[in-house]
């Protein structure tokens, strides 16, 4: 009798312990579940499980930087192509007028060159000592192909984002450990003399919408 | 009792029952005839017996892919490669869009159309670009079929596509589990398991899903041969499809087609888990927001204005 009773107590305790164990496991998994899925928005959550950045094994090429430009002389060569003159052809022998702001202030060449880029003189960017070059605010002369350094003097926030890959178009690979990338230079999208992005006609008008009149009936 | 001579022992009640049953069976056969005819023409036995994507073994999947490639060759005359690129460990995809820069040119929608082998007749695309009044974020008041030079001075432009939600309502409502969320965050569809009920299309708060009302028509020369089983392979008629962040490209390390097509660089794509990625930079330094945050869908597609 006593033996039977102790056996019953033993089994009862065992079953109870089993229930407790299951409950504990459930509680723990529920807690971790809340930790993993709780909170609002993605960034805070993903910050918890960061991975080391893959080593970039491919390079990024920047396209769209312009060479030193030529000025059309109005003549055409035997192939019908316009004859361009280097800036220094004229400017080497002429005194620079530091106050000039626009093409129409000049008597020759540069006509039709309207500048909508702040209130700056030509020599704010062009080097009056050598017109085949540009000049930084520090006085340092730089090549035309290096113009990104010139733009970033004033457009710091844009350059900061550009450096981080958050400004400017690109093609190729997001994962530089698996392939190269091509990025646009400032001048690929922005005209140096009128940098505001030009308006365009949109392409690819959607054709799967109900007629406009129908939509107006049903707001 | 009246006895029909030819039926012998059969009484009138039984005879009427039999006649009624035959009539019913005939009516049923007639009613389902179009479905039987369609199924026998449009569905091969292999396709009908195909298992769910997640239950396919490597060999079975290879066989399915070979069949699909042969079907594309036969029906569209194009030699294509259908790949099954799996999520990479340590990668969760995120996308951000700079609304200060987007000019609404719709080049992204066009690139999507071409990359993903969309039906040419309906001009389908996974991206809808909304022209919105400045100062408002009311998606209902946005227009998608604007046709004037952009950007207009008093407007801003908001491309909307699949937000690859962490809590995707579209996945929850699917009655057959034909759509699910993958480890890298992408919500995908097994087009061969989808029954076309369109519950997911109704459940999505972003109108990110599209239904194939017809068999997609794509000229042979325009078919993109780089295809993924879960992404841009040519869809069958009667199934739902959606943006997959071009997983056949992005899981191979490339940028999505819509980003490459963007002339202004408004789109930023990358790995959310990499603290040095472009997308992490945007989330860390910009004031980003998500669409319809109050619904709790937790999109992995972010919008921001330049600051």
Image (cartoon, grey):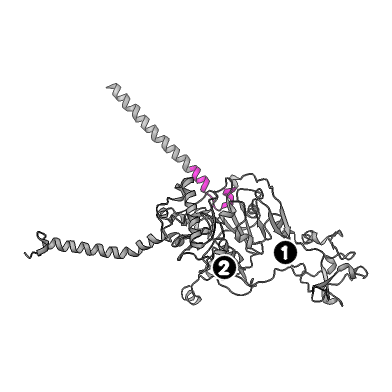
Residue A140 belongs to magenta span: no
**Front residue of this view, candidates B208 and A42:** B208
Left or right: B104, with B166 as reference point: right
Question: With respect to residue B199, does A71 lie above or below?
Answer: below
Left or right: B93, with A76 as reference point: left
**Front residue of this view, candidates B64 and A142:** B64
Q: Where is residue A155 in the image (x, y as percent from the top left)?
A: 75, 61
Labels 1, 2: one chain: no
Question: What kind of element bears circle 1?
Answer: helix
Residue A6 visible in the shown view: yes
Chain hosting mark 1: A
Question: With respect to residue B265, does B275 lie above or below?
Answer: above
Q: Position of residue A75 (x, y in %)?
A: 84, 76
Pointer 2 residue: B130
Question: What kind of element bears circle 2?
Answer: strand
Residue at 90 percent across and 64 percent down: it is: A129
Q: Where is residue B273 in the image (x, y as percent from the top left)?
A: 60, 48
* Quarter of the rendering occupied by the C terminus of chain B: bottom right
Left or right: A187, with A123 as reference point: left
* Quarter of the rendering occupied by the N terminus of chain B: bottom left
Residue B206 visible in the shown view: no
Pointer 1 residue: A188
Near mark 2 (Cα within 10 A), the count class, few <14, some 14-19 or many ≥20, is: many
Image depth: mark 1 or mark 2 in front: 1
Cα distance in 3D space between marks 1 and 2: 26 Å
Residue A34 belongs to magenta span: yes
- The quadrant where residue B173 appears: bottom left
The span shown in magenta is A31-46
Residue at 50 percent across and 71 percent down: it is: A209
């Amino acid at each position: 009798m006593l033996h039977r009773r102790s056996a019953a107590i033993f089994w009862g305790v065992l079953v109870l312990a089993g229930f407790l164990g299951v409950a504990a496991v459930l509680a723990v998994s529920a807690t971790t579940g809340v930790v993993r899925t709780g909170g609002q928005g993605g960034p805070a959550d993903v910050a918890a499980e960061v991975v080391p950045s893959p080593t970039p094994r491919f390079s990024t090429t920047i396209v769209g930087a312009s060479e030193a430009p030529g000025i059309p002389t109005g003549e055409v060569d035997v192939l019908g192509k316009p004859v361009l003159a280097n800036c220094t052809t004229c400017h080497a022998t002429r005194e620079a007028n530091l106050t000039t702001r626009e093409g129409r202030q000049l008597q020759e060449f540069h006509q039709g060159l309207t500048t909508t880029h702040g209130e700056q003189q030509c020599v704010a960017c062009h080097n009056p000592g050598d017109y085949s070059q540009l000049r930084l605010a520090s006085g340092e002369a730089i090549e035309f192909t290096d113009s990104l350094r010139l733009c970033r003097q004033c457009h710091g926030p844009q350059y900061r984002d550009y450096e981080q890959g958050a400004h400017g178009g690109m093609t190729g690979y997001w994962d530089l450990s698996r392939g190269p990338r091509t990025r646009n230079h400032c001048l690929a999208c922005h005209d140096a003399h009128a940098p505001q992005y030009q308006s365009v006609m949109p392409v690819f008008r959607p054709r799967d919408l109900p007629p406009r009149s129908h939509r107006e009936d049903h707001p | 009792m009246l006895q029909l001579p030819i039926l012998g022992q059969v009484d009138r009640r039984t005879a009427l029952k039999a006649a009624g049953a035959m009539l019913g069976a005939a009516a049923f056969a007639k009613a389902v005839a179009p479905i039987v005819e369609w199924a026998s023409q449009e569905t091969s036995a292999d396709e009908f017996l195909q298992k769910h994507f997640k239950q396919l073994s490597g060999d079975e999947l290879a066989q399915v892919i070979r069949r699909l490639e042969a079907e594309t060759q036969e029906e569209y005359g194009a030699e294509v490669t259908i790949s099954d690129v799996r999520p990479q460990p340590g990668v969760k995809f995120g996308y951000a869009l700079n609304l200060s820069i987007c000019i609404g040119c719709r080049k992204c929608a066009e690139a999507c159309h071409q990359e993903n082998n969309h039906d040419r007749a309906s001009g389908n695309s996974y991206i809808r670009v909304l022209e919105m009044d400045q100062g408002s974020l009311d998606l209902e008041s946005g227009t998608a079929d604007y046709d004037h030079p952009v950007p207009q001075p008093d407007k801003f432009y908001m491309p909307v596509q699949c937000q690859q939600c962490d809590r995707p309502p579209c996945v929850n409502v699917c009655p057959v589990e034909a759509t699910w969320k993958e480890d890298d965050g992408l919500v995908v569809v097994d087009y061969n398991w989808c029954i076309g009920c369109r519950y997911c299309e109704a459940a999505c708060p972003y109108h990110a899903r599209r239904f194939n009302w017809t068999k997609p028509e794509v000229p042979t020369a325009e078919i993109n041969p780089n295809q993924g089983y879960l992404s841009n392979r040519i869809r069958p008629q009667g199934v739902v499809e959606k943006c997959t962040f071009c997983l056949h490209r992005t899981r191979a390390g490339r940028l999505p087609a819509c980003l490459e097509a963007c002339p202004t660089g408004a789109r930023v794509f990358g790995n959310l888990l990499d603290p040095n990625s472009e997308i992490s930079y945007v989330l860390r330094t910009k004031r980003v927001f998500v669409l319809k945050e109050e619904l709790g869908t937790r999109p992995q597609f972010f919008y921001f204005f330049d600051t």
